[in-house]
Image (cartoon, rainbow, N blue to C red):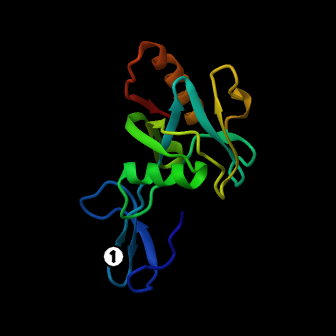
Amino acid sequence: MDIKFCTQCGGSVQQTIPHPDNHARYICSQCGFIHYQNPNVVTGCLVHKNDKVLLCKRSIEPRHGLWTVPAGFMENGESTRVAAQRETTEEAGANINIKDLFVLANLTHANQVYMLYRAELIDDNFQPGHESSDVKLFDQDQIPWDNIAFYTVKLALEKFFSDYPKGQFSLHEIDF
């Protein structure tokens, strides 16, 4: 994203490499404020009840109409666990018990870090939130594999179904 004006004083900015840095940054020509641009954190939960996983059908872009796990951008002032819980409540209305970090995906092409926690579904009370048109539990054979919204989610689901029979879940780090 191009920055044209300083968020501190409104002055114009120029993209240069400040000494002794090695990355081009937007720097205000008036007050000298350096505008850092860093990756966004996406966090959510791979929610399961035994060997079934909870998926949400997206009612928003991007990937409207496709299936995903409840996840979204972390807000300022949140921990990754709190954000994952919030996103799961907002998108799936699910009561969960967050277990452990399950997938850490570095999406360098999109300037995102994707963190998915494994979470157990506490009860069968779930319903679509404002970003979902449907929420369902799927076993591995029922998953609409050709209609999964994001590649990271597809990989996370594959890792879950690989780990589940062993009864042990590993942290899976993926670089794109």
Label 1 secondary element = loop
- Image point (38%, 48%), residue name: 81
- Image point (75%, 45%), residue name: 65
- Image point (42%, 13%), residue name: 166
Name the amino acid, label 1: Phe
Viewport quadrant of the N terminus: bottom right
Q: Is residue 80 left or right of residue 135?
A: left
Asked whether residue 157 is in view, the answer is yes
Which of 149/49 is in front? Answer: 49
Q: Determine the residue located farthest toward the left in the rendered image.
A: 20
26 relative to 74, above or below: below
143 relative to 40, above or below: above
Which of 14/126 is in front? Answer: 126
Q: Mark 1 points at which residue?
A: 33
- Image point (32%, 54%), residue name: 22
Asked whether residue 115 is in view, the answer is no
Q: Where is residue 165 in the image (x, y as percent from the top left)?
A: 48, 14
Q: Where is residue 50 in the image (x, y as percent from the top left)?
A: 51, 25
Q: Where is residue 117 in the image (x, y as percent from the top left)?
A: 43, 38
Quadrant hosting residue 140: top right
Q: In this view, does 50 lie to the left or right of 166?
A: right
